[in-house]
Image (cartoon, grey):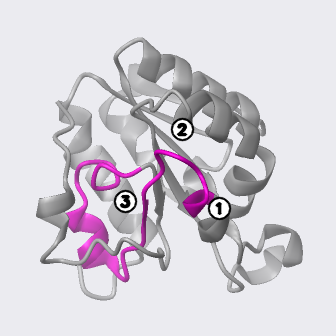
Amino acid sequence: MMGTAMRTAFGHILQHELYKNPRIVVLDADLGSSTKSIAFKSAAPGRYFDMGISEQDLMGTAAGFAAAGKIPIASTFAVFAAGRAFEQIRNSICLPNLNVKICVTHAGLTVGADGATHQAIEDMSIMRSLPNMTVISPSDAIETAGCRSGGCGSRWAGIYTYGPGSCGRDSCSRLSVPMG
């Protein structure tokens, strides 16, 4: 996996490993090709949901799936999850302490031609302020692959340079929560 983009590793894990658990569902906000969450669709098309450009609905639906006993993995860009869907994450996921994995990509300043509207430098600090929220930040594809439990049991898992609560190669199995 050396030299592999973290989002590519994320897609690979969804497609080749996490699909095996029938409780896992993957939701994205019309960004599946960019975040690589669309890879799950080829393995489990009935459990992949493209919510369109509607991050609030993405998080609300993920909360509903979790309340019904599923393990949702919600994927979008960091700026849209932390910005557009903050209230839904806070009130519908964190306060009731639901088992939702939020895996985001494209954080920081290096989002290419998308520019300032797609840059997120505050996402991890916003998410760290929430109750029942754990933030992890793998540093490369190897660490991302080590987090096979959909974010090491955490809720905010940026697929980029994630922040505090590091999910390093040696500590990931200790943090891991079984997805079953």
Instruction: Give the label, 3 or 2, closer to the camera.
Output: 2
Q: Is residue 100 left or right of residue 152?
A: right
Helix or strand or loop: what does disc 3 sit on?
Answer: helix
- Residue nearest the observer in this picture, 48 or 68: 68
Residue at (30, 57) in percent of width and height: 12
Q: For the residue marked with disc 1, what is the amino acid?
A: Ala
Residue at (32, 47) in percent of width and height: 14
**Pointers 3 and 2 in contact (CB under 8 A)?**
no
- CA separation in Å, label 3 and label 1: 15 Å
Could you tell me which quadrant the N terminus lies in?
Answer: bottom left
Helix or strand or loop: what does disc 1 sit on?
Answer: helix
Residue 91 against residue 178 in the figure, above or below: above
- CA separation in Å, label 3 and label 2: 23 Å
Q: For the residue marked with disc 3, what is the amino acid?
A: Phe
**Circle 3 residue:** 10
**Circle 1 residue:** 78
**Circle 2 residue:** 94
Q: Is residue 117 left or right of residue 154?
A: right
Helix or strand or loop: what does disc 2 sit on?
Answer: helix
Q: Position of residue 172 (x, y in %)?
A: 19, 66
Residues in magenta, as a range: 127-154
